[in-house]
Amino acid sequence: MLDPRKLGPLTVSGVCLGTMTFGRDTPEPEALAQMDRALAAGITLWDTAEMYPVNPATAETHGRTEDIIGAWIASRGRREDVQIATKASGPNGGHTRDGRGFTPDTIAQAVDDSLRRLRTDRVELYQLHWPARGSYAFRQNWTYDPRKTSKAEVQDHMDGILTALRDIVAAGKVRAFGLSNESAWGTMSWLAAAERTGGPRVVSVQNEYGPLCRLYDTDMAELGQKEDITLLAYSPLAAGLLTGKYSGGEVPADSRAGGERSRGGDGMLGGRRTARGMDAADAWGDMARGLGLDPIHAAIAFVRQRPFPAVPIIGATRLAQLDHLLSGLDLRLDDGALAAIDSFHRAHPLPY
């Protein structure tokens, strides 16, 4: 197992395989090969969601990624060698339970549906994809309004979810509980709800984090370190910006931005491919290469070396991209490189 980390009762690899392209941009045979390759490299924690694949999520593809992981489990006979993490869609999940998200009355069925697609009797980590009350993730921080729900409404919802999950955990269907796109107040409220209900305690928070998105660095970082909650860092490469493929205004047809455009989207990578974002990505590449480092490998190593519990999620459309990611997992940044990254961040804070 690669660089083992603790997530509550779980011991997982220090890098996680992301699967959100499986079944859309990544065909099933290549997805199966990626899982083989990741496991061979020591990556045992795999993250998915009931709404995957994206982008976009559609009714026709809903649950397809879990189906493909289930096909791997059924064909390889190595279920005990991996830890599967999946997520219940929030109210903006679109095609999940008619957009109603997760409720105390529906979460048991959501777990069972994921288990059926995954062809397994349990998942190691079950996460809530978004807070039901709303989130500042995905550039919503610029206009986030916390007044949409009352404190009492939020607490009632949390108590109901954790009461239901208490029984699901007791039945052996879920081993640990995590959040996603969550705030410091929200995470502490979930911890308090676990105390009230006897439900599972939060062990992880899956938020966006990497050299270009460091909202987690303050309150959430302190919370994670003090409360033994691990960050599962998604988009550490800023949806591909840090690969350099978009430098100079390029949008390769086989890239994520190119795929978004071909499906009628704006190709802006969820608001990341802005002028300031591109300038910061180019500066990151120049800095890393000036240090003799691969910019991709440096970004993943940076996340792994944070002073709070953190596991980067790496994902790839193609096997060759995954191979390149895997080839840099032995990189350890020295003090000079870390100081250069600090200077980079001061020059490019919150670039999108």
Image (cartoon, rainbow, N blue to C red):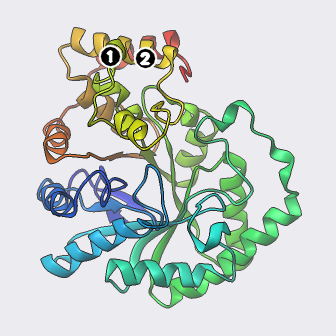
Q: Mark 2 and mark 1 in contact? Answer it, CB < 8 Å.
A: yes
Name the disc covering residue 51, or none. Answer: none
Cα distance in 3D space between marks 2 and 1? 7 Å
Q: Which of the two discs, 2 and 1, labels the residue nearer the N terminus?
A: 1
Between 282 and 275, the one lying in front of the other is 275
Name which quarter of the figure residue 86 lies in.
bottom left
Q: Amino acid at mark 2?
A: Met
Between 320 and 136, the one lying in front of the other is 320
Give the answer, above or below, for where 159 lies relative to 211. below
Between 45 and 143, the one lying in front of the other is 143
Mark 2 Cα within 10 Å, few/some/many (few <14, many 20+)? Answer: many
Mark 1 Cα within 10 Å, few/some/many (few <14, many 20+)? Answer: some
Q: Could you tell me which residue is drawn at 48 percent across and 71 percent down?
A: 176
Q: Is residue 259 visible?
A: yes
Residue 231 percent across, percent down from the top left: 47, 48
87 relative position to 46: left or right:
right
Residue 321 percent across, percent down from the top left: 19, 40
Name the disc covering residue 247, or none. Answer: 1
Give the answer, above or below, for where 85 lies relative to 311. below
Residue 219 percent across, percent down from the top left: 64, 38
Q: Could you tell me which residue is drawn at 31 percent across and 83 percent down?
A: 119
Label 2 sits on a secondary structure element that is helix
Residue 69 percent across, percent down from the top left: 28, 70
201 relative position to 119: left or right:
right
147 relative position to 239: left or right:
right
Between 149 and 81, the one lying in front of the other is 149
Name which quarter of the figure residue 250 lies in.
top left
Q: Is residue 336 visible?
A: no
Give the answer, above or below, for where 32 lies relative to 324. below
Q: Amino acid at mark 1?
A: Ser
- Say which quadrant the N terminus sits in: bottom left
Q: According to the image, label 2 marks what residue? A: 278
